[in-house]
Each structure stands twice: as structure tokens, then as C-alpha cells.
């Protein structure tokens, strides 16, 4: 059973993920940890404990970067 503190941490992490996603930042455990004030290892444990997958956000970021590069090459 997850403690209330860990559940609250997971909720806070989800809010940080949403914020970073809106900013267009690559979302990783270290980038979350920096905002959250925890170690990347602790963030990773919480992500794992609550089955929070960062891969969809990372794919979205990489697709945007790829699209931006393609758009910049067309302009040149």
C-alpha cells in the first residue's frame, strides 16, 4: 500500500510533468527532480511505484524537435 505522502508526491510530479510538457521541455527524472527538489533517483522510484511513463512525453518532444528541424531546413 502506498503512503499518503508518496501519493501526494506522485500528484506533485504529475503537475510538474504537465508544466514541463506545456513548456516544451524534454521530460526526464532529472528535469522533474530539479523542479521537485528531490533526487532523480527518488523521482524515478515514485514514477516506477505509480506506473508513470515518461516515454509518451519524450516521444512527443522528440517529434516536435524533428519537425522544427525539418521546418528550419525548408526555410534555408
Image (cartoon, rainbow, N blue to C red):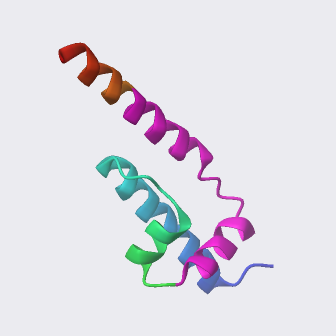
- Where is residue 40, by image quadrant? bottom right
Furthest toward the right, the residue is 1
Q: Residue at x 70, y 84 (%)?
A: 3
Q: Nearer the viewer, residue 40 or 72?
A: 72
Choose top left, top right, bottom left or bottom right for residue 19. bottom left
Asked if residue 47 is among those painted magenta in the image, a careful observer would answer yes
Q: Is residue 57 magenta?
A: yes
Q: Which residues are magenta?
A: 39-66
> Residue at left 30%, top 51%?
23
Kindly give the residue lying farthest to the front in the view shown: 76
Q: Is residue 64 above or below residue 42?
A: above
At a point 46% along the width and 68% down the height, the residue shown is: 32
Residue 10 figure quarter: bottom right
Q: Front-most of 27 and 65?
A: 65
Magenta-colored segment: predominant secondary structure = helix
Count of residue discs:
0
Question: Which x, y percent locates residue 2?
Answer: 74, 79
Position of 48 relative to 23 (above/below): below
Q: Picture coordinates of residue 63 (x, y %)?
A: 46, 31
68 with respect to 45 (left or right): left
Residue 58 is situated, as x and y percent measured from the top left of the image, at: 52, 46
Amino acid at each position: 500500500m502506498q503512503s499518503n505522502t508518496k501519493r501526494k508526491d506522485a500528484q506533485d510530479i504529475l503537475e510538474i510533468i504537465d508544466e514541463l510538457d506545456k513548456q516544451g521541455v524534454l521530460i526526464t527524472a532529472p528535469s522533474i527532480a530539479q523542479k521537485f527538489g528531490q533526487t532523480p533517483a527518488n523521482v524515478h522510484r515514485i514514477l516506477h511505484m505509480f506506473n508513470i511513463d515518461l516515454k509518451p512525453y519524450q516521444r512527443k518532444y522528440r517529434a516536435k524537435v524533428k519537425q522544427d528541424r525539418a521546418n528550419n531546413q525548408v526555410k534555408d
